[in-house]
């Protein structure tokens, strides 16, 4: 489970770096910052759709006794 999280995080970092570099190189700083602001606003809007309430309690698994 942790492997997928780290792989997704690394992929997102690479995508962000490439996108921001390409935007800056081809469109300039203003468009690069506007693209960044639009992506942050999109992430904020998507986060509003996340369920609210108390956090789920994760039970330690038998496969990983270090979690206990």
Image (cartoon, helix red, strand yellow):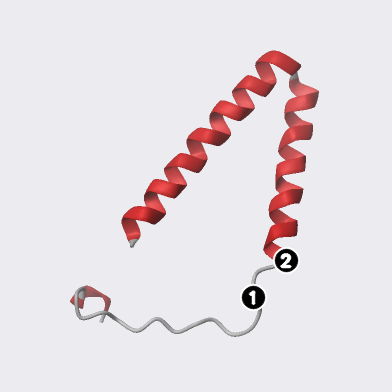
Label 1 sits on a secondary structure element that is loop
Q: Position of residue 9 (x, y in %)?
A: 46, 47
Residue carrying label 1:
51
Q: Residue at x 65, y 69 (%)?
A: 50
In the depicted structure, whether residue 68 falls above or below residue 7: below
Q: Distance from label 1 to label 2 (Cα)?
A: 8 Å
Q: Residue at x 53, y 34 (%)?
A: 15
Residue carrying label 2:
48
Horizontal side of 32 relative to 59 (left or right) equals right
Q: Position of residue 37 (x, y in %)?
A: 76, 41
Label 2: how many residues lie within 10 Å, few (<14), some (14-19) or many (20+)? few
Label 1: how many residues lie within 10 Å, few (<14), some (14-19) or many (20+)? few
Picture quadrant where residue 67 is located: bottom left
Label 2 sits on a secondary structure element that is helix
Q: Position of residue 5 (x, y in %)?
A: 40, 55
Horizontal side of 2 relative to 56 (left or right) equals left
Horizontal side of 59 relative to 13 (left or right) equals left
């Amino acid at each position: 489970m942790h492997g997928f999280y780290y792989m997704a995080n690394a992929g997102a970092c690479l995508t962000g770096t490439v996108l921001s570099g390409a935007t800056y190189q081809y469109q300039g700083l203003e468009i690069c910052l506007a693209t960044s602001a639009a992506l942050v606003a999109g992430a904020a809007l998507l986060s509003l759709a996340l369920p609210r309430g108390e956090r789920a309690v994760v039970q330690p698994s038998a496969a990983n006794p270090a979690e206990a």
